[in-house]
Amino acid sequence: MAATGSVTFEDAGTAISGCADQTVTSGVATCSLSGYIAASTHSITATYSGDSNYIGSTSSLLTQVVSRARTSTTLTSSVNPSMVGQHLTYTATVNPAAGAGTVSFDQAGTPIPGCTAQSVSSGTATCTLSGYATAGEHAIMATYSGDGNYLTSASSSSKQVVDKTGTTKAAMTLSSSLNPSTVGEAVTYTATLNTTAATGTVEFRQAEVTITGCAAQPISAGSAQCTVVNPSSGWRSITAVYSGDNTYATTSSGLGQSVTKKAATMTLSSSLNPSTVGEAVTYTATLNTTAATGTVEFRQAEVTITGCAAQPISAGSAQCTVVNPSSGWRSITAVYSGDS
């Protein structure tokens, strides 16, 4: 006969709310909690009441460990870019918002004075600055200290741009001398400001990486240039970033550059034409450049010739040798795969 009765679950000798006198069904009683609200260790026991057939009993001690919860921290700026001397506020948002503790703000790994231990309230902490004294870019990060219930976390690095104070915004356009261009062709990017009075330099970037030799191109008569030769085909994201000067603020402009593959011509020849039944014949596909790589597929009547599906190119040519078992006329085609 199965035990009946009830079980009371206790934490450190005190009945857990909602878990007293839980009915035993098929020998089992349960206690479900929505979760502990604090990191801690709990001593849990279960006491069986017994019934007319079975004597009551108490379980051995179960130690329930509740660990600190994970957090995430994000960082925002009240104004970005800002001007020299302009007040701005960095805000760190900690999730979950229930976390207490502090947030430290740092710039390039160095704590920002006055912002080393900003209290978290309703999930946020702030760092207010009276303004930067000089123009430039600053890498800002916020680190949450954690507390008794929540683990520490850090934001990703955020770039704060500071422009010169009292300066004029200059418009800039970026153009390409050849778009689309082909592989190996020289392409000149030109950044043009809407004023010839601007001085300073322009940095040209591809996919946010400085183009070699184009890190600080001087401005002359309101424009700067960068010439590149693209070694492969594809689409490029090009950006020009103006440094600014004592009158004009930093600005940028971008464009998409398309680089297409070179056109190659190919001739197909036969080592023996006409040939006789049983004679070996070598077909040779020759490109107009020895720089080409890839393969050539040889076909007869638009069907790939056995053993000649992907013949490697060497010094601009590829070959396929066949022995024709019967007489007649053949339509032979060579198809070049192309390369980058």
Image (cartoon, rainbow, N blue to C red):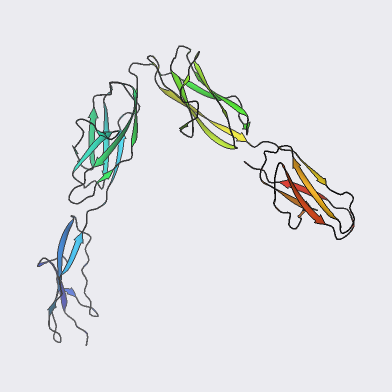
Question: Quick check: 29 above or below 316?
Answer: below
Is 145 positioned to the left or the right of 199 in the image?
left
Q: Name the spot of residue 179 as percent of width and height, x first.
A: 60, 29
**Camera-side residue of 195 and 228:** 228
Q: Give the residue drawn at x 27%, y 51%.
A: 70
Which percent across, then down, holds residue 276? Answer: 90, 55
Q: Residue at the location (83% across, 52% down)? A: 281
Q: State which quadrant residue 236 falls in.
A: top right
Taking 190 as reference, is 32 above or below it?
Answer: below
Q: Residue at x 23, y 40 (%)?
A: 124
Identify the residue shown where x is 48% and y is 12%.
Answer: 196
Q: Nearer the viewer, residue 40 or 272?
A: 272
Farthest-out residue, top: 197
Q: Quadrant of the N terminus?
A: bottom left
Q: Where residue 47 appears, x then y in whole percent?
A: 13, 74
Q: In which quarter of the view is residue 89 placed?
A: top left
* Percent of width and height locating residue 130: 24, 24
